[in-house]
Amino acid sequence: MRCRKHAIGLMVMVLSLFAGTLPAGEFPQDVKLKVVSAELTPPEMFQPRERIDNAVDGDFTTLFHSPWAGIAPKTPLSLTFTLEPGVEEISYIVLTPRASGVNGIIRAGAVAVKRAGENEFKEVETFRFRRTHQACYVNFSPPITNPEAIRVTVTDAYSQDQKYYVSLAQFEAYAAARPEDHPDYQWFTDLTFSELADGITQQDIDGIQNSVLKTIAQQLFDGTYRREYRVQTYEAYRDVYSLAEELKTGLYNQFENPTGIFFEEDQDVLVFVGDTHGHDISLRVRDFAQSGDDHSYRLRTGVNQFKTKGRGNGYLSYYVDHPDSAPPITVHIASGRVNGFFDARKHTNADGATLLDHAVSPIMDLRGQHVQLAYTVNALKANSPENLRDLVEVYDTIVRHQFHILGLFKHDRAPQNRLFGRVVWRGYMFRDQLGAGFNENTMGVVARYPKILQNSWGPVHEFGHINQTRPGMMWVGTTEVTNNIFSVYTQYRFTPDNLRLEHERVAGTIGGRFNAYLNNAHIHHQEWGLQAGPDRAYGERNGAWDGDHFVKLCPLWQLTLFFHLAGEGNPWHRPYFWGDVYEAVRTRDETGISHGQLQVDFVKHVCDAVGYDLSQFFIRIGMLQEVDKLFSDYTSARKTITAEMIQEAVEYASRYPTLPLEDTLHYISGNSYLAYKNRLALEGVPGQGVSETERGIRVDHSVWKNTVVFETYRGREKTHITMTGTGSPHPRSFTDVPYFEDSTKIVAVGFDGQRTQVYPAAEQ
């Protein structure tokens, strides 16, 4: 009967503790101090309607902003806030930056305080903040007594352009609750209240006065407390902005450390935190369902109590510049509902099914070694209910391929931070400041295993946007190109017989994309970046020039095919040579380098990485070609490459030996790379294995073997180049070669440049 008595009592307390309302007065609260006035120095340094008063109006959607025209870099601006009379002490201030955008977010400064009865301000703290949209704190230890006014002098701020600004959404000041050692604390090992002290008895628990701690103690004593998600030790992660600065990429995951706890709006939350070792941590509550609620709550060692401003899953934000030296922090979240999260490093497919069945949030967090996803429970139940581990491992493989290509493993730069993808409710698929977004209507592909293996291009493409190294691998005209270096390689690894460049049926023809490259680069000599294809014609539109994005990708894919895949077992094998190209870009200052020079420098980086003179290849593909045009992109810009720049690049490349297969490198494709790799000689008998079609000649590969391309001639003039396997579905048993009334012959080309006439049988 005694056990039953405690069980009934616990049921009542659990409902009270976790359903959203905490017993009043159980833990003391911080007190927000009233600010009676705000003053700016110099007083004219504000944008009209964005005065300093906006920083104390209680409205986080308004802000103070210095003039939009910009001010002199690092001009000290002083923001002075006067408190109401009679304040006994101040423990910390909160500086909340703008909710979106970058300009003016405070980076560094100093805090000075004027006490009651004193005439001068005295500096008490300096600070330096990470770039963030979350509230930033300056703590005073010990608290400052009898404060009259606080002066924040800003000495540096972030900007997204070349101008200097200062902005601030809200200033707040607080007196922290300072609970004395409560007698109930003695029954726990530390301030996380997650373990009972040795020797505690039921009688001790019955005597606990704090009802919240009594409930927790009883469940711990009975072994019924669900610790798996409520009590966790969280690791530090590299600050996403400093990581992006080092890697020259977009932002990595800002939602590391999922807690597995779901919170409702307007819920009382109680969080117990162990020693933070002086680091700033916060609980971020984000709803990736349609509300989009996103709020952060600063946590400090000991008791933290607050009311949620919105609903969502919880994430323990612990980001520092040097995570290796930041110790783990234990946090006990005593409120909210346990939703759990899936971790592919420890959970099985069966565990995933159980998590989905018991989910209380509309969103399930999925975590692998290199990726984290936030997809809807409904979509996961519909598409991969028993394959969550398989699904996450596919995403991990996607990111692992990107890390290899980027050279992050090779050059010891692979971060602990993950890439992040989540469901979105507008748009289709995209990359933004949070990571990759995939519309709910795409979940039938991106959340479905094994279908994602056959349709990997979209997710790889968007994660590739995050990993684009800028500007050295993302000059004008390449925003939708260089990210696909990852896409085409990953597609090859997953589905080598279903490649988008070589095998997709476009405009009624299998292989039309690759053939557009072969002909517009090597027959029509269009500039690389402007070459026509199924998606773009050659020419100017709306004042700017553009080309087919897939056609631009083809020669970059050829480099991967030749040096990475076909190189295996050959002297030219340069596995993951791209990593050295990216490292060259990461480790040099590219400030002020023109788009044309970035393209020319890319040529040099590739030559350095493979150790061969590839100048003739880059001339052939149109990358080393004179151009002076406005190129279209998300931000259009002029790209100029002069004859002098080309000559300098050619001379630079000449320090390396000539590539043995220099004359056929530009012909390699996913259909022919094995001929290069295995050095397979061209085979075929003129006039045999050919038949006429409406569009030309069909060449049978049971007769013509190890072909790389077919060349169509009119007299001595080469009029068309056709990739082997064009027009043929897997297993590429034939090639449809164009042949017109004025055509005179078709020639097959082998990997080593050997040429044999295919049609007609006799030389013409």
Image (cartoon, helix red, strand yellow):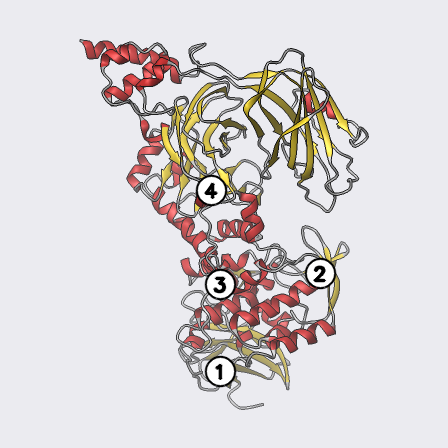
Indicate the secondary structure of the residue bearing disc 4: strand
Residue at screen point 33% across, 18% down: 186
| Residue contact at pointers 3 and 4, CB within 8 angstroms | no
Residue receiving disc 4: 237
Would residue 441 be visible to someone looking at this image?
Answer: no
Above or below, 388 relative to 696: above
Say which amino acid is labelled 4. Answer: Tyr
Q: CA distance from mark 1 to mark 4?
A: 50 Å
Q: Position of residue 177 (x, y in %)?
A: 50, 17
Nearer to the camera, 628 or 589: 589
Indicate the secondary structure of the residue bearing disc 3: helix
Q: Nearer the viewer, mark 2 or mark 1?
A: 2
Q: CA distance from mark 2 to mark 1?
A: 37 Å
Q: Position of residue 607 (x, y in %)?
A: 57, 72
Say which amino acid is labelled 1. Answer: Asp
Q: Residue furthest bottom?
A: 763
Would residue 113 be visible to someone looking at this image?
Answer: yes
Circle 2 residues within 10 Å: few <14, some 14–19, many ≥20: some
Say which amino acid is labelled 2. Answer: Ser
Indicate the secondary structure of the residue bearing disc 1: loop
Q: Which mark is residue 752?
A: 1
Say which amino acid is labelled 3. Answer: His
Residue receiving disc 2: 594
Q: CA distance from mark 1 to mark 3?
A: 24 Å
| Residue contact at pointers 2 and 4, CB within 8 angstroms | no
